[in-house]
Image (tube, grey):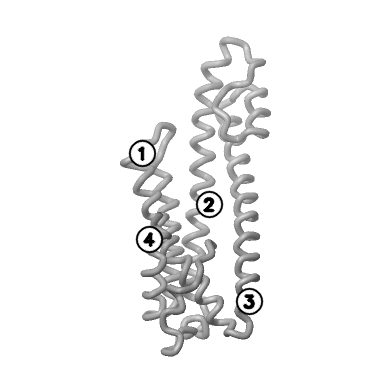
């Protein structure tokens, strides 16, 4: 919803101040929103912990999406706009898939490590390797093992969620810093007086 409501305004700001700082600022704000989710525990409070993080993350995406798309197309020039749009979308989709794979590995490794530190039964550790965020103990446990397994699974799921969230937030912060330092002058100067309004008119593609 925030992206829908604020992307046009973000595009207008990019036309006025350049794409570099909107892209960098949006990435930093989005990463900060992810890091705010680290406050959420096993039983998070929606209004106090989840909603603020979601709003900050959404505001960052709203600042980022339209200027990023416009900056890529503006830097490529009108004659290469079609190719630039295709490459931008392909890179965005590839990045999303790689991000899911990397974060999934982090979550799985953290869940297993947490259970091993808690001396969970071997069956619970094996289950965690296949289902890292599972909080229901496997059926082949003895009755005395079940309470300890439930507690260990809940703690491991929380640790795994925090680890994945920290990676996402760190990547967002790193992307913002790289955008601030490494975005070329051509991208920052892509909007000319004749091209005013281009950012807010372009269709947005999520990074």
Estimate the spatial distance between the alpha carbons at disc 3 and disc 1, rounded to whole Å.
Answer: 42 Å
**Mark 2 and mark 1: span between their CA atoms?**
22 Å
Spot occupied by residue 28 in the image (x, y as percentages of width and height): 43, 63
- Say which of marks 2 and 1 sits in front: 1
* Mark 1–mark 4 distance (CA, rounded to whole Å): 23 Å
User: Which x, y percent locates residue 8?
Assistant: 40, 69
The answer to which image quadrant residue 7 occupies is: bottom left
**Mark identifier at residue 46:** 1
Label drawn at residue 16: none
Tell me how far mark 2 sits from mark 4, CA to CA: 28 Å
Work out whether mark 2 precedes mark 1 in sequence or the reverse, and give the earlier one: 1
Q: Earlier in the sequence, mark 3 or mark 4?
A: 4
Decide: marks 2, 1 in contact (CB < 8 A)? no
Please say if 179 is above or below 41.
Answer: below
Q: Secondary structure at mark 2?
A: helix
**Upstream in the sequence, badge 2 or badge 4?**
4
Which residue was labeled with disc 3? 82
User: Which of these two is toward me, 13 or 110?
Assistant: 13
Q: Residue at the spot x=53%, y=46% of the render?
A: 164
Residue 144 placement, left or right of 29: right
Label 4: which residue?
5
């Amino acid at each position: 919803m925030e992206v829908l409501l604020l992307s046009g305004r973000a595009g207008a700001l990019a036309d006025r101040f350049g794409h570099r700082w909107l892209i960098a600022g949006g990435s930093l704000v989005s990463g900060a929103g992810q890091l705010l989710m680290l406050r959420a525990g096993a039983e998070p409070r929606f209004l106090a912990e989840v909603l603020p993080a979601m709003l900050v993350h959404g505001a960052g995406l709203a600042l980022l999406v339209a200027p990023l798309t416009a900056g890529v197309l503006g830097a490529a020039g009108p004659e290469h706009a079609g190719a630039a749009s295709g490459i931008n979308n392909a890179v965005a989709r590839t990045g999303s898939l790689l991000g899911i794979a990397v974060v999934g590995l982090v979550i799985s490794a953290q869940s297993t490590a947490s259970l091993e530190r808690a001396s969970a039964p071997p069956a619970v550790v094996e289950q965690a390797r296949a289902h890292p965020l599972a909080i229901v103990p496997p059926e082949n446990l003895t009755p005395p093992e079940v309470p300890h397994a439930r507690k260990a699974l809940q703690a491991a799921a929380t640790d795994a969620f925090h680890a994945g969230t920290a990676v996402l937030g760190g990547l967002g912060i790193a992307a913002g810093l790289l955008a601030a330092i490494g975005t070329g002058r051509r991208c920052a100067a892509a909007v000319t007086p004749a091209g005013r309004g281009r950012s807010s008119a372009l269709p947005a593609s999520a990074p």
